[in-house]
Image (cartoon, coloured by chain):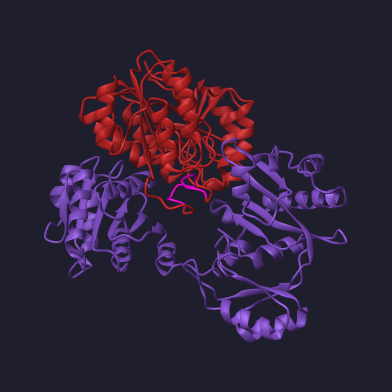
Amino acid sequence: MRLHEYQAKQVFAEAGIPTPESQLATTVDEAVEAAETIGYPVAIKAQVHVGGRGKAGGIEIAADEAAARSAAEAILGMDLKGYLVDRVLVEAAVDFTDELYVGVTMDRGEGQPVAMVSSRGGVNIEEVAAEHPEAIAREYIDPAFGLHPYQARKAVYEAGVDDAVALDLAGILSTLYDLWASNDASDAEINPVMITADDEIIATDAVLNIDDDALFRHPELAEMEEEAAEDDLEAKANEYGFDYVRLDGNVGIIGNGAGLVMTTLDLVDYYDGQPANFLDIGGGAKAERVRNALDMVFSDENVDAVVFNIFGGITRGDEVARGINEALEGFDELPKPVVVRLAGTNAEEGMEILNTELVQVEATLEAAVKRAVDLAEGVTA
Amino acid sequence: MSVLVDQDTSVIVQGITGGEGSFHTEQMIDYGTNVVAGAVPGRGGETVQGIPVYNTVEAAVDAHDADASVVFVPPAFAADALFEALDTDLDLVVAITEGIPTQDMAKVYKQLKSADAHLIGPNCPGVITPEAAKLGILPGDIFTEGPIGFISRSGTLTYQIVSNLTERGLGQTTAIGIGGDPIIGTDFVGALELFEADPETEAVVMCGEIGGEDEEEAADYIAEYMDTPVVGFIAGRTAPPGKRMGHAGAIVSGSGTGTAQSKIDALNDAGVPVGATPEQVADYVEEVR
């Protein structure tokens, strides 16, 4: 789960990390009022979960009321890489002499947290990491101890941060690690940390991404998630408890198990079709889950045909088939053709039970995918 | 021969009193697994499926000289259960639990480095040596004894590809589901080492997926150290960057690392053929062995 910049900044500020004065606004008038209160110049920043907001026109600096109004008018309601901007953060613009980077993340290869500092802040840090890996100082952290203060200092000095701000920055890095650990974050990042002419340090951006699997012990953060606007279908999937990712093709895909569903997507592509989604219904394939899954995929207007791929495993194929039949009975007529493939324990019995007036049945994964791709193509052509 | 488990492995079940734990204990026993005890805090003295339950893992291990544990403990308590298991003489811990917070696993992983046990998982279907023992939730029927070692990050994808192999008469020495989480106890390299040392394993199938760099590291290991031929499969060729595909670990990062293509290229460079479909995996296995 990703927090918005304004949410993350609030968490950072409460922990004592200096941030610019700011206010959230959802209308142009609110934004102008906020700018008047804060004083010019201000930065007006789109609050959407998209990287590279600045380049895409989602951040503007305004020196007076007229500029603030036109910036807010331009940004509020804009489509930023597919996301509708419905709120902006208005904050005091910082006059800076240098931009730095600090971050904490989980290095999954090492199975260990890592703290990072770079004197090349203000740019895409992943590009810095790819092109100039030596420009990022890294300290691996023993999670039993946390980030030792000396490690924070070491990283800061190694990154070549100016002596005048080095110790303050090390302090911010320590706080950032504590926030990362206490909030079960996957990433905590400030890019940039701005340095002013009088050697003040100020966090002008904030990233805090939380491990979804740990949200159960952070109800206050879980609440923030509901504020974040999502794709309608993705919100619906959340409600049903499905793992769902929307893509832009026309072959709907339902299956059980992440790896097998991914493989079904790949096979659709392999047979020259275009997957419309990833949808993992998990174990069991009970009637209600099957019905909800079909409902989701049918409500995606891009979908022309559906492939339903279940590997029975412990759940027997005949039970799965009964669940599918029961789910199908809820529909008078299927709006789009559905190809079902059952495998695993008792799969043959399952296939015999399936209601073939409503669905088409194939015995192998490859055949089912090919058939769905052909059906989808037939609709498009 | 086999790796990690055989018919003599004596097994305890942590979380045996829960729905999943109890159901799969029965399934494991039916398969022939030598399940000797369960461990659940506060439930010592009870029996589940005829198996005695102890309050602590240590008591269960000591009373039955157990070798391995299967963990069905819910995510919020799972890390504690793993620490408890690692604090005994167990050789093998198989963590089935899905959804353990990653920071908890980082702590377990740190502890694992100073322990002697193998940890498989978490978020995995388990380990099976066909006709001998299964530790986990794998459907026994689709596996058959034979010369192929099998390693996978995913559950149902394991079942799919194993079925393709079994249908061609390509049985398995042992199949290991290593798990779909960002931090797992035994990675591809760890599992490949086990099969390389097993004289009965004539070829290994490794099923990877997007996310992380485990498959790339496995490719380096194969090129440098392995004589046993390996065939690969990588799920997620069509996955878009930045979207988690079900598994916590299955995500292509914004910087483009962890893509299916980088894994396929690394494996191909190490001389490992990578099937584009499950059927092709079986074709390649027939060719290389």
Q: Left of A380 or right of it: where is A133? A: right
Q: Is residue A274 above or below residue B18?
A: below
Q: Quadrant of the C terminus of chain A?
A: bottom left
Q: Is residue A200 above or below residue A85?
A: above
Res B61 → quadrant: top right
Q: Quadrant of the N terminus of chain A?
A: bottom right
Front residue of this view, candidates A163 and B127 = A163
Coordinates of residue A361 in the picture (x, y in percent): 16, 51
Q: Is residue B235 above or below residue A52?
A: above
Kindly report the secondary structure that dominates the magenta region of the rendered protein: loop
Part of the protein shown in magenta: B244-253
In reply to whether residue B247 is colored magenta, the answer given is yes
In reply to whether residue A79 is colored magenta, the answer given is no
Coordinates of residue A8 in the picture (x, y in percent): 66, 62
Observer able to see residue A16: no
Q: The chain drawn red is chain what? A: B
For the point 76% across and 78% down, the residue is A40
Res B135 → quadrant: top left
